[in-house]
Image (cartoon, helix red, strand yellow):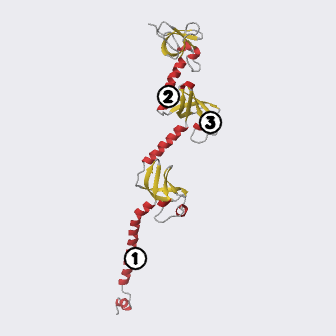
């Protein structure tokens, strides 16, 4: 039974022979296929005479049904690329992080290769911060995510910036997960705004103390009550969408009873000391009463 092939089909074939410029293969259907040396591999220095032998099985993609000599033309590279595009589409859908080696600098960015496919990394996607010198990235390995992929146009755009941003987001989330609403922590005033103050409560994590939460007393201006660098105790009152709400007033409310009790205790002790002094005789008779005359 004759198999009907179409351009684009990926087939398994068997090497029949290696000539000076091409390889003849058996398509297992009584048909002979031809693979040019340049379509066998993109590896530098690849020698078909050393790597191929009769009977070796190859996977190739049909690029032409008739080369003018009645032979089917195939390409191992094309098959490899088709499979690579499919794998990269899956990686893009899964938002996977991949590693690439930057080969060269081009206008507006750099070029790397991923599964044998040429990929472009724009300068704006090389890092989270501004990149001044593209040449600094040539020869480096980078962790990247696929920004966009269009197999039909052989267009593949990568982003290292997306990986950095994801890592930063995960680190930030880990810090948030370690916090507990209702707990009291010590922080440092990082920035003052008209509406309140941002207090650093963990490395790289700030929370907002709204002006209404600075003190039990009315605060007209934030700078009248706080200064940058000041150590403060704050209560975590809420967390939503990565934002932390803090209150100094809540801490003041919690500590006020103990402060009032301490003040009352100090006052009572002072009264007791005064009473002791008053109860001790201080008249002349009292003083003379303790003297024994011979």
Please give the label number shown on residue 204: none
Q: Is residue 127 above or below residue 50?
A: below
Rendered location of residue 256, percent (x, y) = 41, 65
Please give the label number shown on residue 89: 2
**Mark 2 against mark 1, which lies toward the viewer?**
2
Rendered location of residue 144, percent (x, y) = 53, 34
Few, some or many residues within 10 Å of mark 2 (<14, 14–19, 20+): some
Q: Is residue 65 above or below residue 273?
A: above
Q: Secondary structure at mark 1?
A: helix
Q: Is residue 29 above or below residue 212?
A: above
Q: Sequence order check: which comes first, mark 2 or mark 1?
A: 2
* Residue underneath mark 1: 270
Mark 3–mark 1 Cα distance, whole angstroms, equals 73 Å
Mark 2–mark 1 Cα distance, whole angstroms, equals 80 Å
35, 212: nearer the viewer: 212
Q: Along the horizontal axis of the image, is 271 left or right of 119?
A: left
Quadrant of residue 37 within the rendered picture: top right
* Residue underneath mark 3: 136
Measuring 54% from the left and 62% from the top, which residue is drawn there?
221
Q: Along the horizontal axis of the image, is 117 left or right of 237?
A: right
Quadrant of residue 284 within the rendered picture: bottom left
Rendered location of residue 172, percent (x, y) = 48, 45
Q: Secondary structure at mark 3?
A: helix
Measuring 40% from the left and 76% from the top, which residue is drawn there?
270
Rendered location of residue 6, percent (x, y) = 51, 14
Q: Along the horizontal axis of the image, is 105 left or right of 31?
A: right
């Amino acid at each position: 039974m004759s198999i009907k092939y179409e351009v684009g089909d990926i087939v398994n074939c068997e090497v029949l022979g290696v000539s000076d410029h091409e390889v003849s293969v058996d398509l297992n259907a009584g048909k002979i296929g031809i693979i040019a040396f340049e379509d066998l591999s993109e590896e530098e220095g690849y020698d078909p005479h050393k790597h191929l032998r009769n009977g070796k099985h190859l996977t190739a993609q049909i690029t032409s049904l008739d080369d003018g000599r009645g032979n089917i033309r195939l390409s191992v590279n094309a098959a490899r690329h088709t499979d690579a595009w499919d794998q990269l589409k899956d990686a893009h859908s899964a938002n996977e992080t991949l590693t690439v080696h930057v080969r060269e600098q081009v206008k507006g960015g750099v070029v790397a290769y991923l599964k044998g496919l040429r990929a472009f990394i724009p300068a704006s996607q090389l890092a989270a911060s501004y990149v001044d010198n593209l040449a600094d990235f040539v020869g480096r390995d980078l962790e990247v995510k696929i920004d966009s992929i269009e197999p039909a146009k052989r267009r593949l755009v990568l982003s290292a910036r997306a990986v950095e941003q994801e890592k930063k987001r995960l680190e930030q989330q880990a810090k948030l997960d370690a916090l507990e609403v209702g707990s009291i922590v010590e922080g440092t005033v990082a920035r003052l705004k008209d509406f309140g103050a941002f207090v650093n409560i963990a490395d790289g994590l700030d929370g907002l103390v709204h002006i209404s939460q600075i003190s039990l007393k009315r605060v007209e201006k934030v700078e009248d009550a706080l200064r940058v660098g000041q150590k403060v105790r704050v209560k975590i009152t809420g967390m939503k969408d990565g934002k932390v709400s803090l209150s100094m007033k809540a801490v003041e409310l919690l500590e006020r009873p103990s402060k009032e009790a301490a003040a009352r205790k100090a006052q009572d002790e002072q009264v007791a000391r005064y009473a002791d002094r008053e109860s001790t005789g201080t008249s002349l008779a009292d003083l003379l009463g303790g003297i024994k005359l011979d």
